[in-house]
Amino acid sequence: MAKKDYYEILGLQRNASEAEIKKAYRRLAMKYHPDRNPGDAETELKFKEVKSAYEVLADPQKRAAYDQFGHAGVEGGMGGGPGGPGGASFSDIFSDVFGDIFGGRRGGAGIFRGADLRYNLELSLEEAVNGVETTIRVPSWTTCEACDGKGQEGGKAPETCPTCNGHGDVRVQQGFFSIQQTCPRCGGAGVVVTDPCRRCDGQGRIQETKELSVKIPAGVDTGDRIRLSGEGEPGERGGPPGDLYVQVMVREHPIFVRDGEHLRCQMPISFVTAALGGELEVPTLSGRVSLRVPEGTQSGKVFRVRGKGVKPVRGGPQGDLLVRVVVETPVNLTREQKELLRKLDETLDKGGDRHNPERTSWLDKAKRFFEEFKF
């Protein structure tokens, strides 16, 4: 009986790409595998056909021979034992279908990118708002110059790991599944150091402290990060370095509190200034400004000083300074001062709600509450 065409078995055109061949094989192998169709002889036969077709078409040399000579070009090279077309286990299919998803490494060269580092930088509010250029000292791994980062004495290239043949991983059969694990000898590098460098002990890097100049842009705030590309740990076996992330933390200020692009502060004023009004000298991060307080100002009143806040680091208009005034009650009064206050209070009471509108309004509300509430 004439053998079926391998392309026809997989449902492909003869110009199908490698990715199309693998995709068709995964779909059909999962569909017809005997473990998923126990006792079905016809399905088992279809699975063997699919496996045979894939083993030929997935191999560039076998595929070329098949395209030129047909089945005659590939017969004799494939057995029917456990590794042949009829004896694949479900674990083989599992590995092939999911190997790319789980990132199985092929032919690892032992070169790994270095780790990223983080440096916590504490700034004053003035430095964060205005920007600053500072120097930081970072403990880090640096490439060993003695071996040029290769780990071998004299800078020689490491040797291919004999356990995994340079793949970086090995397969271990555990019952139903074939599990891919990191090579225990080379740790996934694919290479081993046989003659370790005496300075770095074969690691290809040494630990040092380096100084870096960091330019902090104006307007940064707690939580912002600045990336210094290539200033992280060097890669293993000469791999590219990672990055350094400078994490900003702004210290608490004795006067100002930042609120986005605005600054807030609380300023005590005397009873006389609140009652009669006056001029106040208010501090800002760029100097002093004059603030006019109108007469009759109540405690808690917030005044806005335009343009004395923060210029956002990501752009936008500069914020404002919000000044909340708090009327300070005088303490440690003399007998004479107390007497003067009592006389003042008497004259204020005679004026009724003309002098104390807030108190009068509150008393009216309290009176209505007690009248309506039945104890």
Image: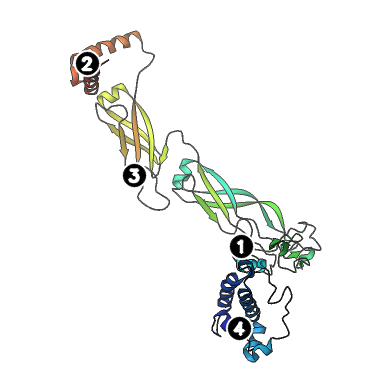
Boundaries of the magenta span = 79-88
Residue found at the far bottom of this picture: 69
Query: Given this view, does label 1 or label 3 mark the residue nearer the observer?
Result: 1
The spot of residue 6 in percent (x, y) is: 60, 83
Rendered residue at 61%/68% (across/down): 37
* Residue placed under numbered mark 3 in the picture: 307
Query: Given this view, does label 2 or label 3 mark the residue nearer the observer?
Result: 2
Query: Given this view, does label 2 or label 4 mark the residue nearer the observer?
Result: 4
* Residue placed under numbered mark 2 in the picture: 348
- Mark 4 vs mark 3: which is more N-terminal? 4
Query: Given this view, does label 1 or label 2 mark the residue nearer the observer?
Result: 1
Query: Given this view, does label 4 or label 3 mark the residue nearer the observer?
Result: 4
Q: Secondary structure at mark 3?
A: loop
Q: Secondary structure at mark 1?
A: loop
- Mark 2 vs mark 3: which is more N-terminal? 3
Distance from Cα at disc 4 to Cα at disc 1 = 29 Å
- Mark 4 vs mark 1: which is more N-terminal? 4
| In-front residue for pair 374/2 | 2
Distance from Cα at disc 2 to Cα at disc 3 = 40 Å
Distance from Cα at disc 1 to Cα at disc 3 = 55 Å
Query: Given this view, does label 4 or label 1 mark the residue nearer the observer?
Result: 4
* Residue placed under numbered mark 1 in the picture: 102
